[in-house]
Amino acid sequence: MTEANQPPGIRDMIARLVSLPSVSSASPDWDLSNEAVVQTLAEWLRPLGFETDIMPVPGMAGKYNLIATLGRGPGGLVLSGHTDTVPYDERNWHSDPFTLSERDDRWYGLGTCDMKAFFALAIEAVRGLDARKLKQPLIILATADEESSMNGARALAEAGRPKARYAVIGEPTSLRPIRMHKGIMMERLVFEGQSGHSSNPALGRNALEGMHAAISELLALRADWQARYRNPAFEVQVPTLNLGCIHGGDNPNRICRRCELHFDLRPLPGMDMDELRSNILQQLQPLARERNLEMAFSPLFDGVPPFETPANAELVRTCEALTGHRAEAVAFATEAPWLQKLGMETIVLGPGSIDQAHQPDEYLALSQVEPAVTLLRGLIQRFCVE
Ligand SMILES: [Zn+2]
């Protein structure tokens, strides 16, 4: 292996990753392939001894996951990140989002903190590591579409790969371990009745009145869930249900034929998404039937389950010891539920602040770089070498 094959330094790696657009979005106008990012990571990892497996995400053209493995064995550690970024508004940036720019001891660029830089830091941490010294494998996992459908992580869970004992997701947490987040559900409810002249209610079936009753039921369910579930680790300690938007009817003097409501639910760890949906359905079906309204209730996207790793888990205790911080809960969702589904003890822990994620002038503070590399080396030492 020649020196020329080795990956470049941290700054150059981050600059290269930032320069490769990989926006993912439910809107086709924005959505891009992540292939260039995944190929670049694979090219850097191969000379370091990693076996690289680039897996197309089924049903999603141009989207790939990368599983890069160093060493062998049944246990081991996964360092996981997503390769995509959110869309951006160039007019609000003070420098080109795709050109890494250094000012005020910060690296600015789209995806610096969320979360392309994490890959560069992970690669830096493994540089010079001798595969023969590993007792357990080290896996670098790079996923597609975390910012949109989470279909990269879903595809991995379905494929049953990768397998390891522990997983660290390097989302920006300011290097504080996170062992819990809420889930995200976005649901759509539609009532369809019959229009008619407003002067005689018997001429129609009013979808808007049905929705009024449905909203009362949803708010009653919310009150019930909030009375039963509480977790003091979260800033908002109870599950939430937000009525987000509603569209129905067209005229004051016409019986409303159709009404559509979109709402958002944030379940706490321990709440099951399918159970919540079936509770909602049970409450709403009778009220639609009484009013002779057609009802459709469906998710707007598949949702992200809530996530929790126990406080006494070995990975949690190790991360607390290495960072000097107690593990916390956060308000944002991650791919953690799917990695957990693969049987791995999972934690979210990475450089950069979530406050800079999804913002114009996204940056990574240079002060996070060395501590992150040191932390990753500590985790590799603990879970792969010792
Ligand atoms: Zn992220």
Image (spheres, rainbow, N blue to C red):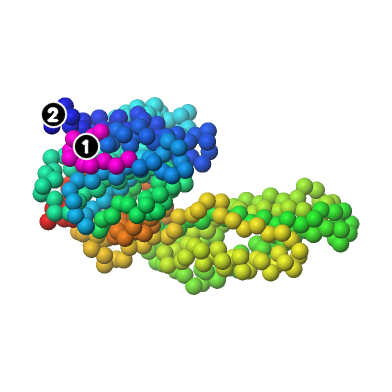
Residue that sits furthest to the right in the current view: 199
Left or right, residue 218 beside residue 122: right
Q: In x, y percent, where is residue 315?
A: 24, 60
- What SS does tag 1 mark? helix
Q: Amino acid under label 1?
A: Arg
- The residue positioned 26% from the left and 65% from the top of the image is 313
Between tags 1 and 2, which lies in front?
1
- The residue positioned 40% from the left and 49% from the top of the image is 155
User: Residue 46 bears which disc, if any?
Assistant: 1
- The residue positioned 47% from the left and 70% from the top of the image is 229
Vertical position of residue 373 compared to residue 302: above or below? above
Q: 377 or 4, which is in the foreground?
A: 4
Q: Quadrant of residue 42?
A: top left
Q: 299 or 100, which is in the foreground?
A: 299
Crowding around mark 1 (Cα neighbors within 10 Å: few <14, some 14 to 19, many 20+) is: some
Q: Quadrant of residue 128?
A: top left
Please check the rendered image and state whether residue 298 is part of the magenta-colored stretch, yes or no. Answer: no
- The magenta segment: 43-54
Q: Is residue 234 visible?
A: yes
Q: CA–CA distance between discs 1 and 2?
A: 13 Å
In the rendered image, the quadrant that contains the N terminus is top left
Circle nearer the N terminus (1, 2): 2
Residue that sits furthest to the bottom in the current view: 228
Q: Is residue 325 visible?
A: no
Left or right, residue 43 beside residue 299: left
Left or right, residue 240 beside residue 178: right
User: Residue 3 bears which disc, if any?
Assistant: 2
Q: Amino acid under label 2?
A: Glu
- The residue positioned 65% from the left and 66% from the top of the image is 284
- What SS does tag 2 mark? helix
In the rendered image, the quadrant that contains the C terminus is bottom left
Q: In x, y percent, where is residue 242?
A: 56, 57
